[in-house]
Amino acid sequence: MTKYTPMIEQYLSIKAQAEDAFLLFRLGDFYEMFFEDAIKASQELEITLTGREGGMEERIPMCGVPYHSAESYITRLIEKGYKVAICEQVEDPAEAKGPVRREIVRIVTPGTVMDGKTLGETKNNFLVCVTSADDQYGLAACDLSTGELFVTKTEDTLEQLVDEINVYAPSELIGQPELLDKLQSSMSGWLTTKLFTARSGMDEVLFESQFPEEERQAIPSVSRDAASLLLSYLNETQKRSLSHITHIEAYDRQQHMTMDPFTRRNLELTETVRERSKKGSLLWLLDRTVTSMGARLLRRWIDKPLTSRDAIEQRLEAVDCLYNGLIVREELRQQLKEVYDLQRLVGRISYGSANARDLLALKLSLMQVPSVRQLCISSGSATLRTLGETMDDCGDILQWIGDAIAEEPPVSVREGGLIKAGFHGRLDQLREASTNGKKWIAELERQEREATGIRSLKIGYNKIFGYYIEVTRSNLGSLPENRYERKQTLANAERFVTPELKEKEALILEAEEKMVDLEYNLFIELRNKLAGEVKRLQLLAETIATADVLQSFAAVSAAYRYRKPELSGQYELNVEDGRHPVVEAILKDGSFIANDTQMAADDGRVLLITGPNMAGKSTYMRQVAMICIMAQIGCFVPAERAVVPIVDRIFTRIGAADDLVGGQSTFMVEMMDIRTMTAKATSHSLVIIDELGRGTSTAEGMAIAQAVIEYLHDRIGCKTLVSTHFHELAHLEETMPALRNHCMAVKESGQDVTFLRKMIRGAASTSYGIYCARVAGLPDSIIDRAYDLLNRFEAISSVLQSPGEAAASVEEALRQNETKPSSPLSAAVQAEFPQPDRVMEVSPIVQLSLFGEGEKSDKPGGKTKTKSELAAEKLVEQLKSADLINMTPLQAMNFLYELKQKASADLK
Ligand SMILES: Nc1ncnc2c1ncn2[C@@H]1O[C@H](COP(=O)(O)OP(=O)(O)OP(=O)(O)O)[C@@H](O)[C@H]1O
């Protein structure tokens, strides 16, 4: 029976330990992949697929990547959402009997990347683990590169869990198989998650040994499960120390404002909806951080606005001080600029991947701490003072590195040059031996030149022959006999050695080898010593990051003249001259028009906003949400004055760009969002609905819109901003005490409409949609036709309002059109329709005139009806039974057209 070769057997047994990963199998200078892995990798990486004899009849598919450039291939696979298991040779091939022993040394996954190039500097890379037990869900989120670990729990619905997962935008999600299945279907499409890994076995012992008892006991059991499962997974894949995960940061979800994934996207908090770019988002605007740690923390703060008034006030107090203290702020910025990414440096130190340059970066960073600390303490802000006082400047660590590490060490830790002179006696001796040896050689060169009279004689070195004396061919005749031993012949020269040169060479090389080994050992010793201090360094990193974000808030606030918000603790929201921070910043020229917002429990709790397209309704509504969020992350806000409540939750239902990912219809998604909204909103929530009820028939859309507004107004009492094109809903103000109509002011002149971007009380009467279509450059024929149709629809809808007043209102509508030539709408209508024609076209209820004067049917005695009378009756019958409410405007139009045709034909 044929069998695989021993090496392939070895491969297969190792592959069995990493079924779900590409196995990169080290063979000399290559990582090779075999079988299915090879076929798939050759496609994914666009590398050549070859084959290899493996003992069986058929060749085994194989492809490989060079060892030295493997990192970029691994990165590409990880970015595509794969796992990569790296299998190394773990014994010296020279000593191996049979195939060299090999082992998987690490499994790289999207959530466990440590390589700096793959990780975005200003973004955390979270691995999130979820578990469920007793109607609760546990969540643990870890950034392996920084060692941060957050845990929490959610109750009740899966939606809450999804909201919380979304805060971390994890690149990988692990969890119990059934739970993961459910999540995968409800999250697909919009999350950044590249990989879902089902796991259930957790290693309690590992968890217990990682964290102190009090820390473990302080968290609920379902969160503990999540953290424990996460740690087991990390241990299984990383196969090395996780000593930099020193602390579990447990929190209660109520400490933060809740936002569902759509709301985060719609408000463009960290990326824009369209391009998904940071530019144009709130994060982009607020980011004036100067350290990577600060940039990551800022993102987290934006993702998690606070709900504790005290905590917000603390941040605001510091921002206020830095806002007004330009000098302190600038100095702080300058000092912080010199601080490297402590968190990731610490990660690499614990991980055993930090080199001497990393330690140097740590040293340079620590050198800044005393002045940062001093600046914070003397800033005049209580928050900054506390921050400064808790800053451990880690002077001892600075000293250790300063004493040991050379000023310009190489990247590699295996080539010497890492350790300073004077740090270690034995190392100094070896260095001296090496330096003296080299001096001796230089002296020898001088003596030999003198003795032989050959000025071009030189002593050189190469790895194969060691030190040699080189003499050019033309000078060979000047060499004394028998003193030199010939070693190598070149085209133009001969190389020689002498016994004393060989002797010295042995001494020099031995010293150098020992030196490199000793330097490496000393470096590792120092790195391990530093690894024991990671907790201190992590705490320091956190305080530095906090100071950085606070200065960033102050810098942006000062640049855009934001104001400190007042957190009233009351229901009211009162903003004077509020602006949308990002739209304002993008407009640059100061042309943004500020608007007020007043929402009180009994006055303006619901704002119903009507107004033309493009008038700025969405911007206005988003602006209110932005101001609340900015206040709750502790930043100043774009307004002259803002008194804001603490909002527990923001819901938005805006736009249609994101709807289609899940294969849902736009309307269905809207309804599902509204369902969540009605189920979860409290009186402390802020609800924003843009164009409520669009996407279905007019009548139904309007009915749903009204019902939703009533529900939010009467039952929930949350602050609600609704924009709508259903101007008819304006009447709600009469029956809902806390609802107020607002609209965006517009100035008409001639054919043109100017959007004033000013919010005013009252309801708008038109949407100027066709005007916008004209501005957008649609052909004139379409625009004219649209005005034509609009005129007919409006006439019909006025009939729908009250059939009794129909004719009068149609007449009235037309008369108004005549008397308002300045309106673009009326101008177009007039141009297109001469008066009599229009009357005939747009009067659907023409029953009054359907009957010819001499043909009235009210004749007594049941006289036989004329043909006209019968036709008229039939028409009236048709009109009466028409279900106008359920017709779309177009159906109504067609119906009217048919009636007219019949009337013209039968009622001559
Ligand atoms: N207050 C403002 N000051 C200056 N420009 C503004 C203001 N508000 C909005 N704009 C500008 O007007 C554009 C349209 O605003 P927005 O999208 O909010 O209108 P809208 O009324 O919601 O329109 P639609 O009903 O078509 O969605 C924005 O892109 C912005 O550039």
Image: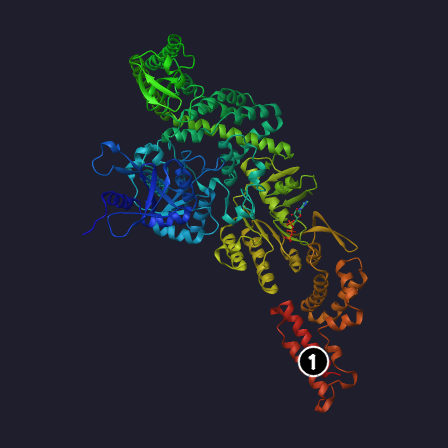
Q: Is residue 471 above or below residue 623?
A: above
Q: Quadrant of the C terminus?
A: bottom right
Q: Secondary structure at mark 1?
A: helix
Residue that carries the numbered disc 1 in the rendered image: 902
Q: Quadrant of residue 272?
A: top right
Q: Nearer the viewer, residue 238 or 433?
A: 433
Residue beneath the point at 23% across and 39% down: 99
Q: Nearer the viewer, residue 398 or 604?
A: 398
- Looking at the image, residue 58 sits to the left or right of residue 332; the answer is left
Q: Say whether mark 1 is within 8 Å of ligand 1.
A: no
- Looking at the image, residue 126 sits to the left or right of residue 279; the answer is left
Task: Report the amino acid beneath label 1.
Answer: Lys
- Looking at the image, residue 427 sits to the left or right of residue 547; the answer is left
Q: Is residue 389 above or below residue 109?
A: above
Residue beneath the point at 79% across and 57% down: 822
Residue beneath the point at 61% across and 65% down: 699
**Circle 1 crowding by C-alpha within 10 Å: few under 14, some 14–19, many from 20:** some
Q: Residue furthest left?
A: 1
Q: Nearer the viewer, residue 300 or 63?
A: 63
Q: Is residue 281 above or below residue 423?
A: below
Query: In this view of the protein, can residue 133 be seen by the observer?
Result: no
- Looking at the image, residue 505 sits to the left or right of residue 559; the answer is left
Q: Position of residue 80 (x, y in %)?
A: 43, 46
Q: How many marks?
A: 1
Q: Position of residue 850 (x, y in %)?
A: 74, 80
Q: Position of residue 864 (x, y in %)?
A: 71, 91
Q: Position of residue 111 (x, y in %)?
A: 40, 41
Q: Nearer the viewer, residue 104 or 122?
A: 104
Q: Quadrant of residue 465?
A: top left
Q: Is residue 688 above or below residue 629?
A: below
Query: In this view of the protein, can residue 846 be seen by the observer?
Result: yes
